[in-house]
Image (spheres, rainbow, N blue to C red):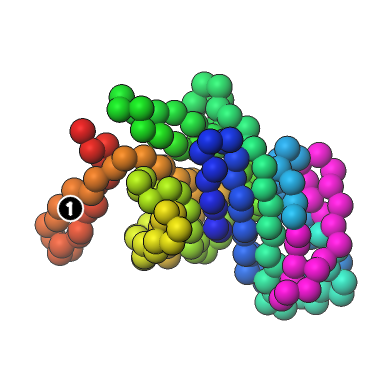
Amino acid sequence: LSIELNIEDKSILGNCQINAMALNDFDTLQVDLFENLDIVSIKENGKDLSFYRRHNAIFIEIPEMIKDTLFEITIQYEGIPEEAKNPPWDGGFIWDEDKNETPLIGVACEGVGASLWWPNKDHPSDEPDSVRLHITVPDTLIAIGNGQLESKELEDRLATYTWLVKNPVNNYNITLNVGDYIEIQDTLINASGEQKLNHYVLSY
């Protein structure tokens, strides 16, 4: 999942690559994404796929998908996601500022569902077995995601942070936090050995 944040107009540009196995033969795949976000394209291995919408559901036409087939689809989308009115109970994006008037951004979707900001099969039973999350923000900010930080890349005053989760995770627990953070490292020592801990706190 790749997300670029445009903080000024509170919009996102996203690209979601889904790798899956067909558990049955089918010709239509449902993926969920809130209807206020626009689909730019849906492709399978680089080839455009037809699709149609019904409210917050997208129905992707994949001719003759055979059981036990591994497949990959890529969904590019954009728009202004719902803004949280009372997070975390009333979910959505949080576009805020810290006391230094620096952007402070997050997302809360445990109640309303992860499809308010990225395309997925939005059901509690569905857990991807791993997630790689690319978050692109202005290079004056730090973007934090789930799992372990893999890399940070700088280009044209933007920074892309790549985070990797190597274990199954609920869709609604995939998240991001963006702000003027600093990292504090620590080590937990117990009977099973050492565990590195990385804490991200606001700089002040």
Q: Locate residue 7, reporting x and y percent.
A: 51, 38
For residue 59, what is the image quadrant?
bottom right
Q: Main secondary structure of the magenta part?
A: strand
From this view, report whether residue 44 is shown above or below residue 59.
below
Bin the neighbour count of mark 1 within 10 Å (Cα to Cα): few under 14, some 14-19, many 20 and up: few
Q: Locate residue 12, reporting x and y percent.
A: 59, 45
Query: In the figure, is residue 196 to the left or right of 7?
Result: left
Q: Locate residue 123, reporting x and y percent.
A: 65, 47
Query: Foreground residue, 63 or 79?
Result: 79
Name which residue lies at 82% across and 66% down.
49
- The boundaries of the magenta stretch are 41-59
Name which residue lies at 68% across and 77% down.
70
From this view, report whether residue 158 is shown above or below residue 87.
below
Asked which secondary structure carries label 1, the reply is: strand
From this view, report whether residue 7 is shown above or below residue 171.
above
Q: Outermost residue, front direction? A: 156
For residue 1, what is the image quadrant?
bottom right
Quarter of the picture containing the C terminus is top left
From this view, report whether residue 107 is shown above or below residue 38.
above
User: Does residue 56 belong to the magenta stretch?
Assistant: yes
Tally of numbered tags? 1
User: Does residue 47 belong to the magenta stretch?
Assistant: yes
Q: Locate residue 148, reporting x and y percent.
A: 34, 60
Task: Give the amino acid at mark 1.
Answer: Gln
Query: Foreground residue, 27 or 115?
Result: 115
Query: In the figure, is residue 196 to the left or right of 180?
Result: left
Name which residue lies at 20% across and 59% down.
196
Residue 152 at least partly seen:
yes
Residue 112 at least partly seen:
no
For disc 1, the marked residue is: 185
